[in-house]
Image: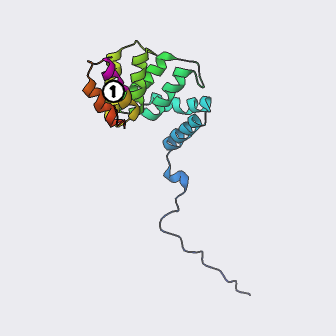
Amino acid sequence: MALLAIKAPPPRNKRPVQTMTDTISNYDMQISSGIAAFEAKHFARASGLLSPLAEAGDPQAQYRMAIMAQNGLGMHENQGLAYRFMKAAAEAGMDIAQHGLGFMYLEGECTDRDPVQAAHWFRLAAEQGLVGSQTTLARLYAEGLGVEKNPEEARKWYRLAGFDEV
């Protein structure tokens, strides 16, 4: 009778090996995929991925859905949906959405024209350091649009936006 040599299995680590899918949630994958599709201009795909996240309250998804709805990218143009999602993302504190909502009010796109509301939303984004909003707010003060005309306040916002000679 021959004896067989049996090898012991290699020792196992006490912690299981983590894979990429273990550390990234389905939510993270969906938002990342949706943003990547949006950036790659695959708007129908982006809309499909981001719509449920926007409805669930994700500001990143809401902002991108607002852009697509406003411009008919990957879906039929829907001004009401664009306004709703842009406002929700702005209210969540997203500076670029505050800027976008400011322009909606300034231009009367997706909502009634309201320069006072425009100035409010531009100010919120400007206070977060968004240069485009700082510049636009400066212009509003220079022209007295939605705010009382105030050349000194206009200069302040132009300087904050990086304009030295105003």
Please check the rendered image and state whether residue 30 is part of the magenta-colored stretch, yes or no: no
**How dense is the environment of label 1, judged by Cα within 10 Å: few (below 14), some, or many (20 and up)?**
many
Q: Amino acid under label 1? A: Ala
Q: Which residues are magenta?
A: 136-145
The part of the image, by quadrant, that contains residue 73 is top right
User: Where is the C terminus found, in terms of image quarters?
Assistant: top left
User: Where is the N terminus found, in terms of image quarters?
Assistant: bottom right
Q: Nearer the viewer, residue 141 or 19?
A: 141
The part of the image, by quadrant, that contains residue 151 is top left
Residue behind mark 1 = 138
Residue 127 horizontal side relative to residue 32, left or right: left
Q: At 58% across and 75% down in the image, what residue appears?
A: 10
Give how far across and how far down residue 16 sits, in percent. 51, 63
Q: Nearer the viewer, residue 41 or 18?
A: 41
The part of the image, by quadrant, that contains residue 156 is top left
Give how far across and how far down residue 127 sits, in percent. 31, 34
